[in-house]
Amino acid sequence: MFLQKKLLFAIIVCCMGPSISLAQTCCIVHDTTGTNLNVRDDYGNLTGDTFSNGECVMPGKRDYDRYGRLWVLVKRWGYSGHPRDWVFGRYLVCNIPCGSGACR
């Protein structure tokens, strides 16, 4: 229920468009399999780290693999370093203003 409220809030915020002006946007992890989202250092190479459902990440570069699947380079919300973790883009809900209350 809590995750559903976060996603509803994210959809409402996204629809408001240009009326919200924050410097960065974030993504919320929404893994529909019900498991944590695996982190990779490159396409297919697991690092052993995961992101929990509902966790906010800051997106960076986006790329597609040879099968046409979207991968997103991310870092944990609040982490000051460069993005270094690749995740399967299908399990991210993006364009959420960082610090909007939707991110924990």
Image (tube, helix red, strand yellow):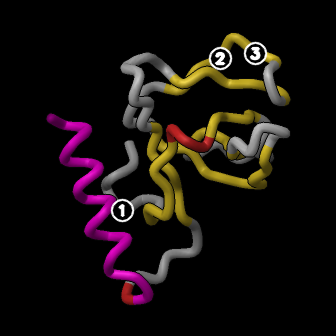
Magenta-span inclusion, residue 91: no
Residue under label 1, please give it.
Answer: 100
- Residue 37, located in which quarter of the rendered image? top right
Looking at the image, residue 85 sits to the left or right of residue 26; the answer is: right
Residue type, mark 3 in image: Thr
Residue under label 3, please give it.
Answer: 47
Return the disc, 3 or 1, that comes first in the chain's sequence.
3
Q: What element carries label 1?
A: loop
User: How far apart are the alpha carbons under marks 3 and 1?
Assistant: 30 Å
Q: As rendered, which of 13 and 67 lies closer to the eye?
A: 67
Residue under label 2, please give it.
Answer: 49
Magenta-span inclusion, residue 12: yes
Residue 35 image offset from top left, x and y in percent: 43, 17
Tally of numbered tags: 3
Q: What stretch is highlighted in magenta?
A: 1-18
Quarter occupied by the C terminus: top left
Contact between marks 2 and 3 (CB within 8 A): the answer is: yes
User: How far apart are the alpha carbons under marks 2 and 1?
Assistant: 26 Å
Q: Is mark 2 on a helix, strand or loop?
A: strand
Residue type, mark 2 in image: Asp
Residue at position x 14%, y 35% in the image = 1
Q: What element carries label 3?
A: strand
The rendered magenta stretch, by its main secondary structure, is classed as: helix
Q: Which of marks 2 and 1 is in front?
A: 2
Residue 94 image offset from top left, x and y in percent: 50, 56
Contact between marks 3 and 1 (CB within 8 A): the answer is: no
Q: In this picture, is 72 found above or below 21?
A: above
Residue type, mark 1 in image: Ser
